[in-house]
Amino acid sequence: SHITPTSDKQQGEFIPYTTKPIGWHTDGYYNPLEQRIRSFSLFCVNPASSGGENSWLDNDILYILLRQQNPEAADLLTRTDAMTIPAHSENGKILRPKSVGAIFMPDHNQLYLRYTQRKKYVQFTDEVVAAVALLDDILAKGSAYHFQHLMAKNQGIICNNVIHKRSGFVDDKSNPRLLLRGRYFVRV
């Protein structure tokens, strides 16, 4: 897909297609588990005039940091009802069904993370709210394991679906930021 700011009302309601910052998330956190995104690629065709830096953190490292601080919080985020993404509908038609699942879960002998810091349209069970706050705190504090990079023209990344975020950016309307994104159901 093409990730670039758009004035298209349908696509523009989704934050990747704006110049706004995007909080920590994994791609496809709203997908049903049988369509989970396990890896992705980004290729920078054209960078923003300023901003648009990406940050990444390995999911295994994040889980270890969380477990070191609070093992009970880590366990709570493996509950199969920890996070709910309500159905997305327009004019009474369901475009994407409700998705309920754990935040951390096993996936073919690997750790899978399904998460977003967005609080709009996201529901957490009461039992996991404090654990989510601790997770957000770890993400906000940064560590030697956090990785940041501002992609230049013709740079790209291919990686497993690690948690990542994007800073806001300023665009040149005549030459807007454009990234090509691929999402895959298999790990790298």
Image (spheres, rainbow, N blue to C red):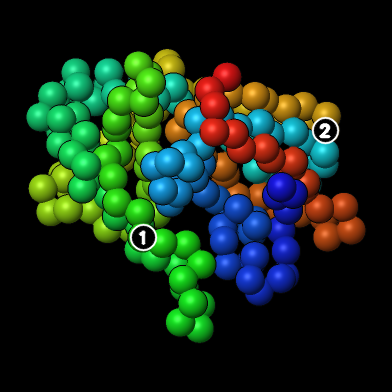
Q: Residue at x 81, y 53 (%)?
A: 176
Query: In which quadrant of the rendered view does residue 132 lie?
Result: top left
Q: Nearer the viewer, mark 2 or mark 1?
A: 1
Closest to the observer, 47 or 4: 4
Image label count: 2
- Residue 35, horizontal then vertical, whole percent: 48, 42
Q: Locate residue 161 relative to residue 183 in the image: left or right.
A: left
Amino acid under label 2? Lys
Secondary structure, mark 1, is loop
Q: Residue furthest front?
A: 34
> Which residue in the structure is indicated by mark 2?
153
Q: Is residue 84 visible?
A: yes
> Which residue in the structure is indicated by mark 1?
98
Q: Residue at x 19, y 29 (%)?
A: 74
- First of labels 2, 1 by sequence position: 1
Quadrant showing the C terminus: top right
Q: CA distance from mark 2 to mark 1?
A: 37 Å
State whether residue 112 is above or below residue 130: above
- Residue 85, horizontal then vertical, whole percent: 35, 57
Q: Locate residue 69 relative to residue 105 in the image: left or right.
A: left
Q: Residue at x 64, y 66 (%)?
A: 12
Dot 2 crowding, Cα within 10 Å, few <14, some 14–19, many 20+: some
Closest to the observer, 5 or 86: 86
- Residue 160, horizontal then vertical, whole percent: 53, 25
- Residue 187, horizontal then vertical, whole percent: 53, 23
Q: Which mark is residue 127?
A: none
Closest to the observer, 151 or 50: 151
Amino acid under label 1? Lys
Secondary structure, mark 2, is loop
